[in-house]
Amino acid sequence: MSIPTDLKYTASHEWARLEADGTVTIGITDHAQELLGDMVFVENPTVGRVLAAGEECAVVESVKAASDVYAPIAGEVIAVNEAVEAEPQTLNENAFANWMFRIQPATATDLDGLMDATAYQAAVDAEAH
Amino acid sequence: MTMTSLKLTPLNAQHRAANAKLVDFSGWEMPLHYGSQLEEHHSVRRDAGMFDVSHMLPVDFRGAAVRPFLKRLLANDVDKLQSTGRALYSCMLHAGGGVIDDLIVYYLNEDWFRIVFNAGCAEKDLAWAEAQRDAHAPELAIIPRRDLAMLAVQGPNAAAKLWAAMPGLEGVAGTLKPFHGAPVGEMFIARTGYTGEDGFEIMLPAKAAPFFWQAALEVGIKPIGLGARDTLRLEAGMALYGQDMDEGITPFEAGLGWTVAMGGERDFIGKDSLQRLPRNRQMVGLKLIDRGVLRAHQPVASEQGEGEITSGGFSPTLNASIALARVPNGVQPGDRVEVMIRDRGHVAEVVKYPFVRHGRALT
């Protein structure tokens, strides 16, 4: 699967999308689900939780292993996607379409501190070697 | 560029052709899955699947003294094997009573037994057996059979599909009962497995393995990776060496007391220690009530004291997380225990295992 150019990325394989209302939607990348294999459990942060950038805030578990999900930016959790908790395998089907949680950023952001698709692709390629 | 010195089975090209995700397993390049571990799991429970288990090591023990030698080497009693093709599950212990490996031993004739060792233990097992041989039965030949490939075909439709793939095989193996086997020329087929389903394990010349694999594929037997092999055996309540037991654990504390033939005059390596050592812990099954996934090494708190999960994961058949755990004696089915997952207590119920047999949930 190609890496969408309208998203931003972290080295720990989260994607982030800045919405028109200034909130940021977070998920895990296709590379992350590929590494983990069949997903069987998702635990999102609770709504209202205030996260620091880089904080461990969610967990995805596959048949193989558990993996932490980190907050790409600081902010308050304002929504979680209960559909991926109910059906974790949707992350395998399309990791970029199935978001996990949404953050109200602590300060207005343009996500410039995160990687763009080209930089993320390079990071994934580097990991493979 | 990655340097690789992984050992390859005779079916490596077949795994690559089937788009396997290949991983390092005990120094062997083995298929973890071929796309979806969950689908592979269900294929074995509902239809038929095949596993390349050629990384395991068959070893022939040949000579007039083979029976008395194995009666001493193994904790189970090979006197239970009296006809060609019979199979027996056993632990091999050191003098302290800990488990060196668990294995299946086959009887071929009075001068010829075959043992299949786990891949990760094969070298130390061989060294151990040779040292025992040198000390007690120097005339005995111990012959590693790396020239053989091993396949497991498992599932409710394993027999029917196997007969379709290999016309003629049904005549030899069609009436085999569980833990019975039969030689077929250079091949050996036994009704054994590691999934809790009906099925067969087949040893055959490495050169013949790709042909066999292709014939099985063509009748719709699905290739299954080691990932599903682990969830299938966990549901079936079967112990995995290195996780549920090792050299520091006796069979009695690994839920394998039923495989140790303590009675009678027979002496075997480790027997003295087993008679002496206390048995304070037992294996139980756990089913997670709260949301999450049980994993090996998570601590378990019970009214009787602390224990630990030895194997855990997600059960595709039960759609719940299950585990095998070593806990103090006195913990019973129906009890609730607390499992620490990422520093938070999760409630699990103690259940009998196996969890699944012949496609049916038992808990």
Image (cartoon, helix red, strand yellow):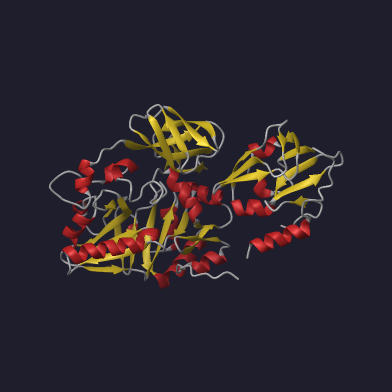
Horizontal and vertical percent for residue B162? Answer: 42, 58
Is residue A2 found left or right of B138 in the rendered image?
right
**In which quadrant of the rendered view does residue B108 lie?**
bottom left
Residue at far right of view: A20
**In which quadrant of the rendered view does residue B254 lie?**
top left
Please count the marks in the image.
Answer: 0
As rendered, which of A4 and B155 lies closer to the eye?
A: A4
Horizontal and vertical percent for residue B155? Answer: 44, 50
As rendered, which of A109 and B263 lies closer to the eye?
A: A109
Q: Is residue A63 above or below residue B142?
A: above
Horizontal and vertical percent for residue B100? Answer: 31, 54
Residue at far left of view: B265
Q: Is residue B184 above or below residue B224?
A: below
Q: Residue visible at 42% across and 29% down? A: B302
Q: Is residue B328 above or below residue B113?
A: above
Query: The C terminus of chain B appears in which quarter of the rendering?
Result: top left
Query: The N terminus of chain B appears in which quarter of the rendering?
Result: bottom right
Q: Residue visible at 33% across and 61% down? A: B124
Is residue B296 found left or right of B127 in the rendered image?
right
Q: Is residue B253 above or below residue B110?
A: above
**Is residue B240 something that shows in the picture?**
yes
Is residue A60 found left or right of B304 in the rendered image?
right
Q: Residue visible at 30% across and 57% down? A: B181
